[in-house]
Amino acid sequence: MSAWTGLGGFVGDARLVAAKDLRIEWRARTTLGQVLPFALLVLVLFGFALDANRPTLRLATPGLLWMTVLFVTVVAVQRSAAVESADGARRVLLLSGMAPAAAFVGKAAAVAVQLLVVEVLLVPGVVLLYDAEVESVPLVAATCVAATVGLAAAGSLLGAVVAGVRAHQTVLPILLLPVSAPVLIAATRAFADGFGTVAVEGWSWVGLLAGFAAVNALVGAVVYGPLLEEA
Amino acid sequence: MTPVESSASPSEPQVASYLGGPARTGSRFTFWLGLVTLIGLATVAALGLLAVPADDVQGDTVRIIFVHVPSALGAYVAFGLTAVGSVMWLWRKSVWWDVTAHAAAEVGVLLCGLMLVTGMLWGRPTWGTYWEWGDVRLVTSLILFLVMVGYLSIRALGGDATSVATRAAVVGLIGAVNLPIVNRSVNWWANRTLHQQSSLTEGKLEDLTLFTLFLAFVVAAMAICWMMVHRFRIGWLERQIQARELHEAMAARRAEAGR
């Protein structure tokens, strides 16, 4: 019984933090006003970079889409960390008495929701711009969810690592992008199956993405407390 | 004499006493270790370049294993040490382990870079290309190299020692736990490996080649120890200086307040 109460409190705290971050995002309209146009811009520029060659673009679609998502993750995580840096908000989070793990889950969930919004618009974007065709909707959807949870977990954790240090805008990509390499590889392969460009076993890649998400979420939940105290 | 100076002088021997010796990075032991290592390096170079016969298949390029394989092994041991040090800092707040983790990361990045460069130099005549995307170990090592460069960049930003230690430890931990996933993903992705299978276990090497390789391992281990001891002592002295600066500043404020 008490375990359930504890779990309920944990989920409630996480939801509070996530709702707070999303409310701030919604009021600032950063995702809609800046991140989404940025993502579309990257898609268009990739088209120029590959000389608008339709067969090449169609073949490269999964990789280009997930590169775009990685760029967007860096921007979203930077925003998410900046919210806590201003006005000593991190101290308040620490003093609120909620479990640091709950705060971490809330922060990561808010980033994940923003990334999912971007992905939901990027997939039709590549269908329109790159002539891609979605063959398996469940596979594409599952890949988006698994990859996004992993990116949001690793991103939120590394966002907390660089929060408050000087030059954090440049350090975050150096830390986040190499760690995200498995997500790029796995999500690209799964999408290649989902888009029917390459015959691979997409679902086993989704399993790898889920593993990445689980490991990084677990590490984040454990070490977020010490990180909050340091910033 | 200003209050700062007066409080600095008595604490001078205190800094040295933390190390149980003078405030420098060398000692009689590291002097002899360094000398033996230098002689060892010269011996390996002489044996590897002159005495060891060329390989039947690979020709003269086989000689690069005397640098490539020991640096690969050394890099992975060093990064393992960084991971252990990171956990020990987060768990026990052990300064000793924190300084060790930093020292190991620097030595590891150096060795990993050496491994990548020698691997590429070997790959060009053997595979016909400097970089082979299909090689799992090469690609995994490069990603690990980049993660550890990120670790060092966090360290290089400076600031409060405790804060930097915690931030760096988390990066070290993330790098370590993701390594198996990176390896697995690259493995599935490449779906094949061009990497030379271990020549040691297949018993393909000549006696002298084998002897030189083992000598190279021993010399590399000594070189790593030498670098680690010096780098550790630099890190340890840095911590003492920071602690002393704080102590001096506090003494100066107290003197100003007349207490």
Image: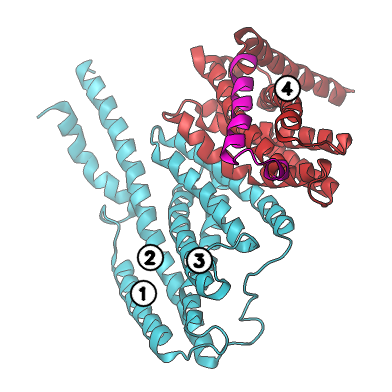
Numbered disc in front, either 2 or 3 = 3
Numbered disc in front, either 4 or 1 = 4
Residue at the spot of label 4: A117
- Please give the name of the residue rendered at 36% of the width and 85% of the height, measured from the top-left corner: B46
Mark 1 belongs to chain: B
Q: Which residues are magenta?
A: A32-59
Disc assigned to residue B37: 1
Label 4 sits on what residue type?
Answer: Val
- For the residue carrying disc 4, how many other residues have a C-alpha within 10 Å: few (<14), some (14-19), or many (20+)? few
Disc assigned to residue B120: 3
Q: What is chain B's hue in the picture? A: cyan
Residue at the spot of label 2: B226
Numbered disc in front, either 2 or 4 = 4
Label 1 sits on what residue type?
Answer: Thr
Mark 2 belongs to chain: B
Numbered disc in front, either 3 or 1 = 3
Marks 2 and 4: CB-CB under 8 Å?
A: no
Q: Quadrant of the C terminus of chain B?
A: top left
